[in-house]
Image (cartoon, rainbow, N blue to C red):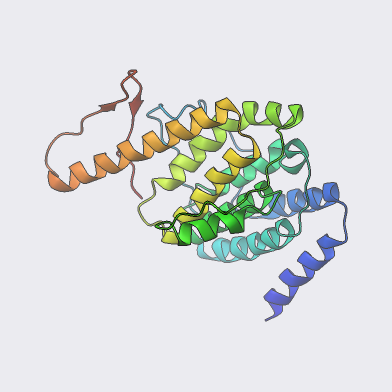
């Protein structure tokens, strides 16, 4: 009860702050979370076609408990966040932190990182509409109207700079074997929000590559189950890019 009260207080307190101060509060909290060093090395390449996998970070039990509590505080603040340019909403330090949260071993941490990321991307409250569509996926939902603004030059520059990095980390977390339905729903929400908020050709291309990579990964998993003793084979994109479908937790 005490922890829940602290989380609620943090959310209510942040609601009275200007948007840029909310981001400063989130960046400060993120820097204090143990086991998630925001100054750690970046991946050498952000290309989905690379066969390089990130190593999932592992923390002690006490660290995981504290990480979860602090991520809940981050989520409470993120839920109060208002419409701002993405360059201000997701400065490099906070974006790197959230992406690193997607490659943590505890699935609870990965889900919370996805939820925070989703809330910061959802500037026009489209997430609820996306979720309602997913719940009625078999029905025709032509009456759903999404709030879409034209992508500004600032946001266009932001997504061109970070798109490959974002989709690489989303791809890595989507491949983890112990993900729950909630993980995949949140990943789907994030992908849809990226398409709605930016709508740039580069984003659509990255989404297509992301979906193709997951499809190849699923095909590879099915093949391994059918024949566990065959040597690993590489599956190639028609253009020659190799996707590594061998990663499991």
Tell me if residue 57 comes above or below residue 41 in the rendering. Answer: below
Residue 37 visible, this angle:
no
Q: Position of residue 57 (x, y in %)?
A: 49, 48
Is residue 50 rendered to the left or right of residue 59?
Answer: left
Is residue 227 rendered to the left or right of residue 29?
Answer: left
Image quadrant holding the N terminus, namely: bottom right
Quarter holding residue 222: top left
Identify the residue at image location x=76%, y=51%.
Answer: 28
Tell me if residue 176 comes above or below residue 40 in the rendering. Answer: below
Residue 104 visible, this angle:
yes
Q: Position of residue 164 (x, y in %)?
A: 54, 30
Tell me if residue 245 comes above or below residue 10 in the rendering. Answer: above
The residue sitting at the top extreme is 239
Q: Position of residue 148 (x, y in %)?
A: 68, 42
Identify the residue at image location x=40%, y=31%.
Answer: 52
Q: Position of residue 197 (x, y in %)?
A: 65, 40
Identify the residue at image location x=49%, y=28%.
Answer: 205
Question: Which residue is nearer to you in this view: 38 or 181?
Answer: 181
Tell me if residue 87 comes above or below residue 114 in the rendering. Answer: above
Identify the residue at image location x=61%, y=41%.
Answer: 196
Is residue 76 rendered to the left or right of residue 111?
Answer: right
The residue sitting at the bottom extreme is 1
């Amino acid at each position: 009860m005490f922890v829940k009260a602290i989380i609620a207080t943090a959310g209510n307190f942040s609601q009275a702050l200007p948007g840029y101060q909310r981001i400063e509060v989130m960046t400060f909290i993120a820097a204090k979370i143990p086991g998630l060093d925001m100054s750690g090395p970046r991946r050498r390449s952000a290309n989905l076609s690379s066969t390089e996998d990130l190593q999932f970070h592992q923390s002690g039990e006490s660290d995981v408990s504290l990480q979860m509590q602090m991520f809940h505080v981050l989520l409470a603040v993120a839920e109060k966040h208002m419409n701002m340019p993405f360059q201000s909403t997701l400065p490099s330090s906070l974006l790197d932190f959230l992406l690193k949260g997607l490659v943590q071993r505890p699935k609870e941490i990965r889900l919370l990182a996805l939820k925070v990321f989703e809330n910061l991307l959802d500037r026009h409250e489209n997430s609820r509409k996306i979720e309602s569509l997913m719940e009625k996926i078999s029905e025709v939902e032509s009456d759903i109207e999404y709030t879409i603004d034209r992508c500004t030059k600032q946001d266009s520059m932001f997504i061109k700079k970070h798109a490959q990095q974002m989709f690489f980390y989303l791809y890595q977390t989507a491949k983890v074997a112990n993900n729950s339905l909630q993980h995949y729903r949140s990943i789907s929400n994030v992908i849809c929000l990226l398409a709605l908020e930016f709508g740039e050709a580069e984003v659509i291309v990255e989404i297509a590559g992301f979906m193709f990579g997951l499809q190849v990964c699923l095909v590879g998993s099915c093949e391994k189950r059918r024949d566990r003793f065959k040597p690993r084979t590489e599956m190639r994109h028609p253009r020659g890019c190799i996707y590594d479908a061998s990663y499991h937790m």
